[in-house]
Image (spheres, grey):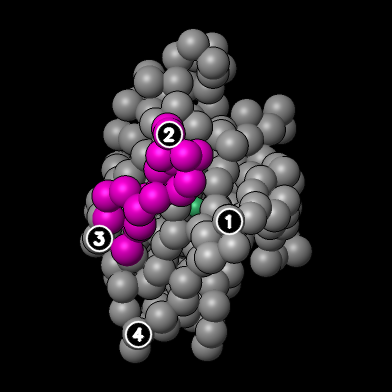
Amino acid sequence: MTAPNYARLRRFLSDMTSLVGGAKQDQDEAVLIEVGGKLVADLVAHDDWLPEEMAAGVADGYRQHLLYCDPQERFSLVSFVWGPGALTPVHDHTVWGLIGMLRGSEVDQRYQRDPATGQLCPGPTMTMVAGDVAALSPTLGDIHQVRNAFTDRTSISVHVYGGNIGSLARHRFDLANNREHAFVSGYSNAALPNIWDRSRESAAGRSGR
Ligand SMILES: [Fe+2]
């Protein structure tokens, strides 16, 4: 079994750390999304770095695994494993986010508030395939519902958010009853991947930051 290419993941995390350190998050959100989006595109262009335990298929629903959280909680990286037919509630994020499709396909249904009534209405729908990247933010619109495009196989996307996403106070929306509910998602995993043991990578001839 081939070890995950953690050098690639470390490079991504190093570049993201530089990006959030150099940008004033409030003023430079457009820069974060543009440059961060290119970093995410590079990351999901290669499917050789996600450890198996963060990609294991699930029979139902979906799992959100924390891969890394910046020590100052300026960003976090998660893998989303979508079981066959998995569907989220309509929800928001309260921070910027970048979604990169690593395996399979997902359907991202956006929602927008009608300025006259305040009601949430369906916006654009995007079908993402491996290699695609999408952005969201409270400025651009960060309310959506996501489902696995497949009903017979697992899909996996990796997401970067502008905060410790599993710990943020967010909202689910019950459109039928026009209600919103506060929630904190947490994470599915108890342990993070050890990306810092370079000894086996050296043996395999890999190097990197
Ligand atoms: Fe989401």
Which disc is residue 127 wearing? 3
Residue at (32, 48) in percent of width and height: 123
Q: Quadrant of the N terminus?
A: bottom left
Q: Which residue is mark 4?
A: 151
> What amino acid is found at the position of numbered circle 2 in the picture?
Ala
Q: Which residue is mark 2?
A: 116
Can the viewer see residue 36?
no
Label 4 or label 2, whichever comes before in sequence order: 2
Residue that carries the numbered disc 1 in the rendered image: 178
Q: Secondary structure at mark 2?
A: loop
Q: Residue at x 34, y 35 (%)?
A: 37
Q: Which residues are magenta?
A: 107-125
Between discs 4 and 3, the one toward the N terminus: 3
Q: Position of residue 95 (x, y in %)?
A: 56, 34
Asked whether 53 or 178 is in front, the reply is 178
Q: Amino acid at mark 4?
A: Thr
Identified by mark 1, the residue type is Asn
Amino acid on which disc 3 is placed? Thr
Q: CA distance from mark 4 to mark 2?
A: 37 Å
Dot 3 falls on a residue whose secondary structure is: strand
In the image, taking residue 67 as reference, residue 42 lies left or right, namely left
Q: Secondary structure at mark 4?
A: loop
Q: Earlier in the sequence, mark 3 or mark 2?
A: 2
